[in-house]
Amino acid sequence: MNNLPRVALIGRANVGKSTLFNRLTESHEAIVSSIPGTTRDRQMKTLAWRDRQFTLIDSGGLDPVHDEEFAEDIINQALTAIHQSDLILFVLNGRDGAMPQDKIVADVIRKSRKPCLIVVNKIDHPGLALQAGEFAGFGLGDIFLISAKNGSGTGDLLDAVLKRLPKQSQAKPTMPQIKIAIIGKPNTGKSSIINALLGEERMVTSAKAFTTRTSQDIQIQFHNTLFTIADTAGVRRKAKIFDPLEKLSSRQSLDRLKNADIVWLVTDASEPLSNQEADLSRLIVESGVGLIIIGNKWDLIGDKTDKTLAKFQDYYQRFFAYLTFAPIVFTSAVTKQRVRDLLAMSAKIQVERFREITENALDKFLKVILSRQRPLKGRGTRYPYIYKLKQLSVNPPHFQLVTNYADINSSYLKFVEKQLRLKFGFIGTPLKIESKKLMLKGKNN
């Protein structure tokens, strides 16, 4: 976790905290909705303003009177945000005026003895500013009138935030960084794995599916490597999604594949694997990222013997037969068994994703595999002749077979991939292998 100053957005439900979070961080990471309780976990993101940085924390409504199912957990998350912050932005709805719930929140902030600024949101036009004076009665700090929707007043607010934060060195971390996305069906224990890694209840968890709604980044330093782990909402089949918030969350979860280095595909080891997990795994492979398959809830497997682990490994390997390169790790977020192994394995996979094989080593490798098995005909009528095997790029590793005019059979490309893995490793990362016809001068195709 970084050591930047922390600023927490605190307020009752539906005052626009998540909209303000998105506005200030210039992102769309916080899901915005008029439904109370949309935000459940603490959302954190580094914000840069006038050559300085701080961490902005979004939280759920500190609203003890609403009846959202996870009210107690949401309130605890907000209280933790207050405790961990260096400055509180008390966000209020300028259209509603001071509400009884606002007074309860104000008392909580006052008892924390943390520095505070009052942020009156939803002042979308000048006429609404006239009634903002009533918020001065809270006596919690200077008042700023803003509109998170159109951005007015937010620059002055950020200037005031910087004046009240301790100045720190903003040197950028030089340690290696790895971006991980946790993907899986609902209720497989993705957020529980995050909590187990952090050693705290960072994410709201429950036995109910779709507890996590917003994808968010959590940073963990492990063995001189900074891991940025994106916890995501569970992804179900589109035909089973009726809740509009769940649709937004599922789309956001799949979008995380675009920016990840490695994906942890979390499954419930106590339940049979499903077609949805097969579909998710194919999406992951198509995105070109590294992959670890996780069988979580290992603590729920009863009557274990010395053969139980091998039995489950065999079942998973047969189900994910097309993912032979992906390591399978069985974890328990409850007991923390093998949870930290995921970080060590991810660091190893990241090295494999950037592995470069020398031209000399590839020439020797090609001679060996050609002596073992020559390529069969593809779509053409001629037997292919392979001139060279080249590595074009890394992340993921990309290889090219240079041939004569004939196509290479897809089964031979798979053979080459298997031999590359046996010789050079590449654990946890997909390989891209293609063939290219060598165009000889004076010849037609």
Image (spheres, rainbow, N blue to C red):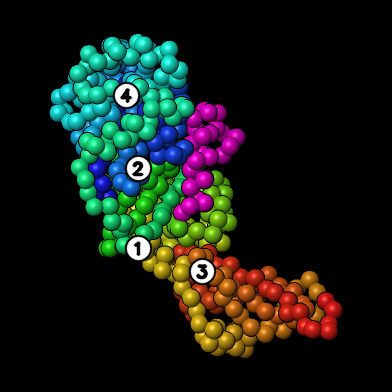
Secondary structure mostly seen in magenta is: helix
Residue 144 position, x and y percent, is 32, 24
Residues tagged 3 and 2 counted as in contact (Cβ below 8 A): no
Task: Decide if residue 5 is on the left or right side of residue 58.
Answer: left
Q: Nearer the viewer, residue 263 or 375?
A: 263
Residue 363 position, x and y percent, is 57, 86
As drawn, the label of residue 176 is 1
Give how far apart the Cα atoms at labels 3 and 2 are. Answer: 34 Å
Q: Based on the displayed image, in which of its 4 quarters is residue 114 positioned? A: top left
On the image, numbered disc 2 is attached to which residue? Answer: 49
Q: Is residue 80 visible?
A: no
User: Where 219 falls versus 291 (above or below)?
Assistant: above
Task: Decide if residue 330 is on the left or right side of residue 263.
Answer: left
Could you tell me the amino acid type at mark 3? Answer: Val
Give how far apart the Cα atoms at labels 4 and 2 are. Answer: 17 Å
Q: What's the magenta region?
A: 236-260
On the image, numbered disc 4 is attached to which residue? Answer: 144
**Between disc 1 and disc 3, whose residue precedes?**
1
- As helix, strand or loop, the secondary structure at mark 3 comes to loop
